[in-house]
Image: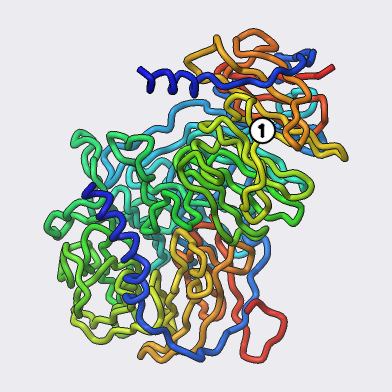
Amino acid sequence: MKRHCLILLAAVPLLAQAPEISFTSDVNLLKYPDSVSIGEVAGVATDSKGNLFVYTRTGHPTISLGTSRPFAHGGSRLYEFDKTGKFLREIGQDSYGFLVAQQVRIDPQDNLWVVDQMSSMVMKFDANGRIQMLLGRKSESEQVPARPLDAPPGRAGRGPVGAGAQSDIFQRPTDVAWDAAGNIYVADGYGNARVAKFDKNGKFIKSWGSKGSGQGQFNSVRGIAIDAQGSVYVADAGNQRIQVFDSDGNFKTQIQNIGSPAAVCITPGAHQYLYSSNSNPPEDIDNGGEIYKLELDGKVVGKFGRAGKLPKEFGTLNAIDCRRDNELYVGEIGNWRVQKLTLH
Amino acid sequence: MFRCILIACCALLAPAGALLAQKAKAQNVPEIPYDSVPNLIKLPDGLYLGEAMGVATNSKGHFFVFTRSANTRLFEFDQTGKYVREIGAGSYGFEFAHSVRVDSEDNIWAVDEGTNMVIKFNPQGRVVMVIGHRPEVVAGALATTFGPAAPAEKYTLGRPTDVAWDQQGNIFVSDGYVNNRVVKYDRNGRFLAQVGNEKAGNGPEQFNLPHGISADLQGNVYVADRSNHRLQVFDNNLKFKASYDNIGDSWTTCVSPGPHQYLFTSNSNPNGNAPGTWENTGEIYKMELDGTIVGRFGHASKTFGGFQVVHMMDCRNPNEIFVAEIESWRVQKLLLKPAGHEGAHK
């Protein structure tokens, strides 16, 4: 009985008492032809021109039968829209790495970084939509029936199995960020419990973290963002905190009482803010869902929104773009849409 | 609990084992400088390369790329890298690309390790012969990947990897991930002989992942015996002649057409890229056929000019090497330079 009480206490997090930020939403921003299909929106990001990139799950990957091994094909697509929401083009049609969309981010040079949860790859496209660099490697084939979610990933060729090894093979990675020197940090992820660091040329440097709840340990790494000083903010959703590290992975501090951080974003300006969403799971739209606006030291400026299906409500928010302080683009897995939010 | 102990043991033993298994590489090998041709391939909008598994040139200088995208596809490019056409679009034999080679009559041979097939296209792109058989779909999905291999059969391939021919047109298939053998067929696809079998081994005439194959003008056969960290040489009847084991892991091999023939082999960096591996892997060796090393070139890197898991190369011109890279989804054309030339990649 005593044990039950403890679990209950642990399961109901303290949430910061924060002022409500008023905001408006445009849910009909994107205009696209009938030939384009938007499914679960895992990623949304803007480039320096204001164009929008949407990485979406448009179907399940299919498995081929009658082969030496079961192979997975397709399932996600990447679209570009202009800032008025007009459809421009598809990027990476039939890409080998597009299976289950997870995230898209744009770096300061307008390169597109696409994170795929099932292929366990981070793909860098240049502004022309051509592959420039690849991190990780897709499992060559799938196991039928599927592996349990906490099992080691499929083998990427004859390479080592991921599972926290000092390796550039990911296990369901979730997000990517860069520091001012161009070093690359990958949130890895649902399967692994670590952050992997690469130099700007993609050379694997190190990774840090393991499964657990202590400092420097993770339980479901859902997102990552880096401030102008190079501090690394990691959304440690299962531990209901954001952990902050220096660029070598040394623990600095943690930010709590903001629910289970999933999508995170740091604004680029002189005064940087951190946004973090307490995303609801798809099976529960009656709790959580709000987005917090924070100072980098963790002080809550305010919060807005809640879980739900209406405009200004959020369904399993998975992406926040915050290129401008008070103009956010958010991608929702639960509601298959992008909302443009204007904070007042 | 048992499982935990096992995993712990493996974790401790694996790195040491890998180091011990790697044989000493040749020292003080001269570096051959080279340039990589920038922007080699021009793809039309909407067309992309995935993992570049195979690249091969024909007599006109066109080159063919066998790639894993959402589906496995075979593309042809001209000498300038301009896209020409797709070959075998939607082919029943295309599932998981592994190798493409062009024979002396400009036929294009695709080796697919997903369908267990070797497919011969004529220069017009029409299928003229197939070797192996794609498992029937009604047999269902195969649940295991690395189970025990069935006995090697004459005409059933087990994840084949590569193909080569001698001057008479006999066909040599390296087979492969499931079997561990090389099969010789006559020019009409009739079984003649094999060396190795379904079981892996590290003695002479045994293999542990025969991953690439090439033949010289005398009909000798060179086999990249990847997980045995060596390259084995056989005569035309697949009798053992020699083993070269100072060149790292031989992932793929190529013999230039001559009259002075050279042998190339790639010590490709492995998947996983753990810290330290890039310093010891990634280079390609240029050798005489007798195993004397002439020089080496290339290094592991994701940036242009470096290699990220070279899977295959073409050496029709021994000073113009095409390489296909798995992990950079890229094909590069390397112009090797004579000794003393400045300003090239090292």
Q: Residue at x 38, y 68 (%)?
A: B103
Q: In this view, does B205 lie to the left or right of A293?
A: left
Q: Can residue A96 be seen in this view?
A: no
Q: Residue at x 17, y 70 (%)?
A: B196
* Residue A258 image point, x, y percent: 64, 25
Q: Mark 1 points at which residue?
A: A264
Up/down of B300 relative to B45, above or below: below
| Residue found at the far front of this picture | A2
Q: Which residue is drawn at 15% across and 69% down?
A: B192
Up/down of B215 relative to B339, above or below: above
**Near-viewer residue (B73 or A227):** A227
SS label for mark 1: strand
The amino acid type of the residue labelled 1 equals Val
Q: Badge 1 local density, few (<14 within 10 Å), some, or many (20+)?
A: many
Instruction: Name the image quarter holding the C terminus of chain A.
Output: top right
Q: Which residue is drawn at 40% across and 77% down?
A: B248
Chain containing the residue with disc 1 = A
